[in-house]
Image: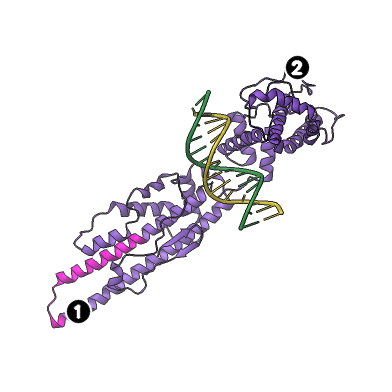
Chain colours: A purple, B green, C yellow
DNA sequence: ACGTATGATTTTCG
DNA sequence: CGAAAATCATACGT
């Protein structure tokens, strides 16, 4: 058989030892496309081990068999292949859906990251059962072919036995050879199947390849947390778990998200301004609603009240700094901060553009605009401090 | 088709 | 080791 998942071409079912002739058995099978492009990382679980072995034993194996002297070794490799196929649910009990076994196998061996189920997995299972089907079909075909061929040879021998004496030993040897060859082919089939499964797995389990955006709700939740903890957007382990649960993603994904978000926010605060305002307003509203009658349930145009609070000022300064910087095309030089700030004060226009109500904080803009450096900046010469309301959020 | 957004991974750093 | 920064690879909107 050999069905290979080629990233661009989809499923290719190639090579198939249809008309069997001895020559064909000996020549090496073509059509196994082993490189699949840019796959750099090895797949997580132990499955990747196939790599180190003589995974693509195809040609070499056939050649060695051609020598035919080779007594069949117990072949640990074959056993490994068998085990893997079994583990993957490919060679296991025949089942139409096959989903249960496959899913179980995938879940068990996948372990870590594979937890975002449903859609992905059904696709995965579909492909897997496809592999499996091909595998079984081919296997059967081989079996049948082997039998046919054997009887054919037997007949020939029998016929010849009339003209010349043929020892039973010779027959036996002949049969042995045939069987060995067929089993070697079978092994190739298994190898190819293994490979296909692995590639499949790598495609589906390697989340980087099959990246899916989080759904709207999840990003809402994450953003909500982020912007309401803008002063310290580092959720604790527990908080992460909570978020993960609420968003139906893993804790690692939450960490990733926050990592990305922090860095990207910091990098270009201007771009996130709108979003920030939005969420700030939202949390403000919800806070107002929660606490008491919202007398000042401001309109979205006057955002940042409660939640963002202290940090927001700081961020704004950073924001302006960066904005000006980018506008000026200036390079990033902390020494110029003062000048820049001056410029900022001159360029009132931006304040509107950014819709930031309270402008810059005179607070030092630490060159990295960082969260980590100035954890409690807000107090000094506070610029029109927002309501000191502690965000009680934890929007359960 | 192409540019941007975005989740994930890798590397660097404290 | 956790976070930042850099980078990758894909998704998604145009």
Whether labels 1 and 2 belong to a single chain: the reply is: yes
CA separation in Å, label 1 and label 2: 106 Å
Q: How many marks?
A: 2
Q: Quadrant of the C terminus of chain A?
A: top right
Query: Mark 1 belongs to which subunit?
Result: A
Q: Residue at x 28, y 67 (%)?
A: A26
Is A145 in the magenta?
Answer: no
Is residue A226 or residue A179 the one in the foreground?
A: A226
- The percent coordinates of residue A71 (x first, y second) are 20, 59
Extreme-bottom residue of the structure: A163
What percent of the width, then of the height, locates residue A11?
A: 49, 62
Label annotation for residue A158: 1
Going from N to C along the chain, the mark reached first, 1 or 2, is: 1
Residue at the limit of the structure toward the right, as seen here? A295
The quarter of the picture where residue A249 lies is: top right
- Mark 2 is surrounded, within 10 Å at the Cα level, by few (under 14), some (14 to 19) or many (20 or more) other residues, namely few
Q: Nearer the viewer, residue A261 or B3?
A: B3
Which residue is identified by label 2? A381
Number of the label disc, if any, that sits on residue A273: none
Residue A185 occupies quadrant: bottom left
Q: Quadrant of the N terminus of chain A?
A: bottom left
Please identify the residue farthest to the top as the structure is shown: A380
Classify residue A385 as left or right of residue B7: right
Left or right: A378, with A126 as reference point: right
Magenta residues?
A: A161-188
**Residue A393 visible:** no
């Amino acid at each position: 058989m050999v069905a290979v998942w080629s990233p661009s071409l989809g499923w290719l079912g190639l090579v198939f030892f249809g008309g069997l002739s001895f020559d064909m058995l000996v020549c090496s099978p073509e059509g196994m496309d082993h490189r699949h492009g840019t796959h750099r990382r090895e797949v997580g679980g132990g499955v990747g081990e196939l790599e180190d072995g003589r995974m693509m034993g195809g040609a070499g194996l056939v050649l060695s068999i051609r020598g035919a002297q080779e007594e069949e070794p117990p072949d640990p490799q074959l056993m490994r292949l068998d085990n893997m196929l079994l583990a993957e649910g490919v060679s296991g009990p025949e089942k139409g859906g096959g989903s249960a076994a496959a899913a179980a196998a995938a879940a068990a061996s996948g372990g870590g990251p594979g937890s975002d189920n449903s859609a992905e997995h059904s696709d995965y299972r579909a492909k897997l059962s496809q592999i499996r089907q091909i595998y079984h079909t081919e296997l059967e075909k081989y079996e049948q072919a082997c039998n046919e061929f054997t009887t054919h040879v037997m007949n020939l021998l029998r016929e010849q036995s009339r003209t010349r004496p043929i020892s039973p030993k010779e027959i036996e040897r002949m049969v042995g050879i045939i069987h060995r060859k067929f089993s070697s082919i079978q092994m190739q089939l298994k190898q190819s199947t293994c490979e296909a499964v692995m590639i499949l797995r790598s495609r589906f389990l390697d989340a980087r390849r099959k990246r899916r955006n989080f759904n709207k709700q999840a990003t809402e939740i994450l953003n909500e947390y982020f912007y309401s903890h803008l002063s310290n957007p580092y959720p604790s382990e527990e908080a992460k778990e909570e978020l993960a649960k609420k968003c139906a993603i893993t804790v690692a994904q939450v960490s990733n998200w926050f990592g990305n978000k922090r860095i990207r926010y910091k990098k270009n605060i201007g771009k996130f301004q709108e979003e920030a305002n939005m969420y700030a307003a939202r949390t403000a509203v919800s806070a107002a609603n929660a606490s008491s009658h919202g007398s000042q349930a401001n309109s979205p145009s006057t955002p940042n009240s409660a939640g963002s609070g202290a940090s927001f000022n700081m961020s704004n300064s950073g924001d302006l700094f960066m904005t000006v910087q980018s506008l000026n095309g200036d390079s990033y030089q902390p020494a110029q901060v003062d000048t820049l700030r001056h410029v900022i004060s001159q360029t009132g226009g931006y304040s509107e553009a950014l819709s930031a109500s309270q402008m810059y904080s005179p607070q030092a803009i630490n060159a990295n605009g960082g969260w980590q450096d100035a954890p409690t900046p807000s107090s000094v010469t506070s610029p029109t401090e927002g309501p000191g309301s502690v965000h009680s959020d934890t929007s359960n």
